[in-house]
């Protein structure tokens, strides 16, 4: 096989060599490859919902219990444990939001707003409910 016969490599192996011929075909090919299939979206949603609740509870504990204990009772134990744990879990939250937003092809503004919801106490619960309703309405309308 000569170099003229080899297809051009693509960045996405799920898309295949046809992407170099028709860039508009990439979303259709990803959908055909299962990139946005309903079961994969549902699994991504479940991962997001779980981590949103965990991050939300951790932030509420940190802000409503840890910070008052630190400044009123001079007890830093809660902040010392929950603070770094919330930080690590927040990174997992960001990855879950990114995964879901790529699968659903969200606009960047929506993605950033949902990501920021993990930094405001109680807002991650509201965002989780909003995202769940949005995804469920979108996946049931496609079926």
Image (cartoon, grey):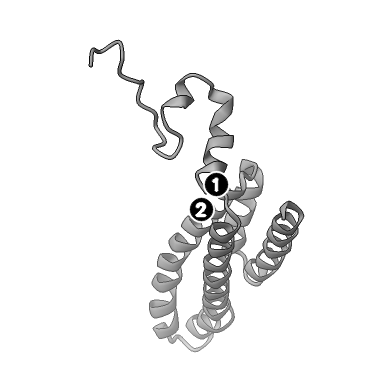
Q: Position of residue 137 (x, y in %)?
A: 75, 59
Q: Position of residue 90 (x, y in %)?
A: 47, 64
Q: Is residue 83 left or right of residue 130?
A: left
Q: Residue at x 55, y 82 (%)?
A: 68
Q: Is residue 40 above or below residue 68?
A: above
For residue 102, which numbered disc appears in the image?
1
Residue 132, by quadrant, is bottom right
Q: Is residue 21 above or below residue 116?
A: above
Q: Position of residue 51 (x, y in %)?
A: 52, 69
Q: Position of residue 93 (x, y in %)?
A: 50, 62
Q: Nearer the viewer, residue 71 or 109?
A: 109
Q: Residue at x 59, y 36 (%)?
A: 28
For residue 99, which numbered disc appears in the image?
2
Q: Residue most toward the left?
A: 1
Measured in 3D between alpha carbons, the distance from the residue under mark 2 to the one under mark 1, in whole angstroms, is 5 Å
Q: Is residue 9 left or right of residue 59?
A: left
Kindly indicate whether the residue at mark 1 contacts the one at mark 2 (C-beta within 8 angstroms). yes
Residue 130, by quadrant, is bottom right
Q: Residue at x 46, y 71 (%)?
A: 86
Density class for disc 1 (Cα within 10 Å; few <14, some 14-19, many ≥20) is: some
Q: Residue at x 44, y 77 (%)?
A: 82
Query: Which quadrant of the rendered structure holds the N terminus?
Result: top left
């Amino acid at each position: 096989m000569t170099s003229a016969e080899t297809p051009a490599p693509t960045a996405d192996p799920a898309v295949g060599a046809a992407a170099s011929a028709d860039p508009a075909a990439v979303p259709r090919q990803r959908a055909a490859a299962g990139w946005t299939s309903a079961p994969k979206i549902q699994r991504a949603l479940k991962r997001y919902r779980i981590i949103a609740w965990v991050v939300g509870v951790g932030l509420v504990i940190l802000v409503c219990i840890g910070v008052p204990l630190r400044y009123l009772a001079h007890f830093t134990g809660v902040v010392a444990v929950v603070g770094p744990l919330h930080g690590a879990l927040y990174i997992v939250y960001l990855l879950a939001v990114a995964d879901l937003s790529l699968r659903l092809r969200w606009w960047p503004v929506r993605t950033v707003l949902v990501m920021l919801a993990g930094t405001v106490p109680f807002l991650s619960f509201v965002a989780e409910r909003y995202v769940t309703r949005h995804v469920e309405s979108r996946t049931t309308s496609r079926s």
